[in-house]
Image (cartoon, grey):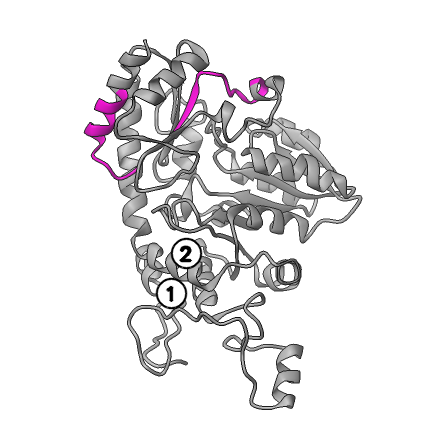
Amino acid sequence: MTKGQKTLPDTLHPRTRAIHAGTRRSQYGEVSEAIYLTQGFVYDSAEAAEARFIESGPDEFIYARYGNPTVAMFEDRMAQLEGTEDAFATASGMAAVSGALTSMLRAGDHVVSAKALFGSCLYILEEVLTRYGVEVSFVDGTDLAAWSAAIRPDTKAVFFESMSNPTLEVIDIRGVSKLAHAVGAVVIVDNVFATPVLQRSGDLGADVIVYSATKHIDGQGRCLGGVICASRDFIRKTVEPYMKHTGGSLSPFNAWVMLKALETMDLRVRAQAEGAQKVAEALQSLPGLTQVIFPGLPDHPQHDLNARQMQGGGTVLALEVAGGKAAAFRMLNALQIILISNNLGDAKSIITHPATTTHQRLSDPQRAALGISDGLLRLSVGLEDPADLIADLTQALTAAR
C-alpha cells in the first residue's frame, strides 16, 4: 500500500467514494492526486520486464496506452461509484461506446438496440458494426414486447441509452436485462443522462455501463473522456486487449481533471437536477411551446418507471417550439444566458437544435421516427439560479413569437 493510503469501509456513501476511492499516493504523501505524465516505465532488470509483460500487478505499469497510475485512480473510483468490479478509461465517450461493443463482437453476431440514440451511437451500430458482418436489429426501446420479439437465442448483446438523446425516452433496464439474460446476451447501457449519481444501472441488471466523462463527470467543459464499467473479466479479458492495441485510452492529464471533478459531481448533478425540475415545471405554462419533455413531469410517458429507477428526472429536458425551425432559431438567438452548444452536463446551461446538430446526418424520415422535429430543442440545465434561466427562456420565447 502506498504512503497515507487507507482501506476504505464498504459502507461509505457514493459522495464519499467519489472523493477518496482508488487513491494512490507516492512516497511524498500528497493530498491531491498526482499527475503521472509518463508514457513508459522503467524495470529493475530484464527479468522484471519479462515478468511484467506476462502478468502485471495492480501497481505495475508497462506503457501509458495500457495503463497509468493517474488513469488507474480514475478507473478505480468510477468502478466503485458504479458498483462494478473494474473499469477502463477511454479517450472519449464514443470511444467507450465503440470499445464496449466492438471489443466483444465478431462477424455473424447479432445485436438488438433501441432505435432512439445519439447520432454517433447510431453510426457505430448502423455503419461500423454492420460493415464487419454484425447483424443489428432496432426496436422501440420503451416496448418490452418489441425487445422480446427481437432478441433471439443467438443474440450476443443488447444496447440502449437508459434515457435517450434527445427525446428522453426511459428504458426499463430490469425488464430488458431479464429478456437479454435469458439467452445469455450481454446488456450494455449508456447511462450518461442519468449519471452514476442518480442511477446505478448495474443494480438494475446491466452488465456493462458506459459514460462520456466529457459530460457530467467533468461537468465544466474542459476535457474529453469516457469510461467502461463492468466485471473484471469483461474489462481485462475483452475490453483491455482491444483498447490497448487500438489506442483509445484516456490521457493521464484528462484522467486527473476527471478525478478532481468527481469530488464535486454529486453536489453538481443534484443541484442541476433540482434546477431542471423547476425549469420544466415553469415551461409547461409558457405560450409558444407545443410540448415539454422531462421524465420528472407527471405527463411523461415513463414517469412512473423513471421514479422507480432513478433519483429525480435528470438534468436535461426537451422542448418543442411552435413554428418549427424558424421559430426555434429565433428563440435560440434571443437567449441571453443559456449558451448554444451541442454538449451537455455542464455547469453552464446549454441548448441545441438536434435536427441541425447532433442528429443532422439522419434523414428526415429517420428524425421523424425518433420524434426529432424541426422545432425540438434539447436543454441541459446548469448551475445557474433556476429563476434566471426561466426568465431567459420566457423572454426568448416571446421573441420567437
Name the side, left or right, on which 230 lies relative to 278: right
What amino acid is at disc 2?
Leu
Residue 273, above or below 72: above
**Between discs 1 and 2, the one toward the N terminus:** 1
Q: Which quarter of the figure has residue 179?
A: top right
Say which mark, if any, is on residue 145: none
Name the side, left or right, on which 199 lies relative to 15: right
The residue pinned by badge 2 equals 81
> Is 134 within the magenta?
no
Extent of the magenta region: 368-393
Q: Measured from the top left, where is residue 260 in percent x and y?
A: 33, 59
The residue pinned by badge 1 equals 21
Is the Cβ of the residue at disc 1 closer than 8 Å to that at disc 2? yes
Residue 325, above or below 134: above
Q: Measured from the top left, where is residue 229 in percent x and y?
A: 52, 55
Q: Which quarter of the figure has residue 136?
A: top right
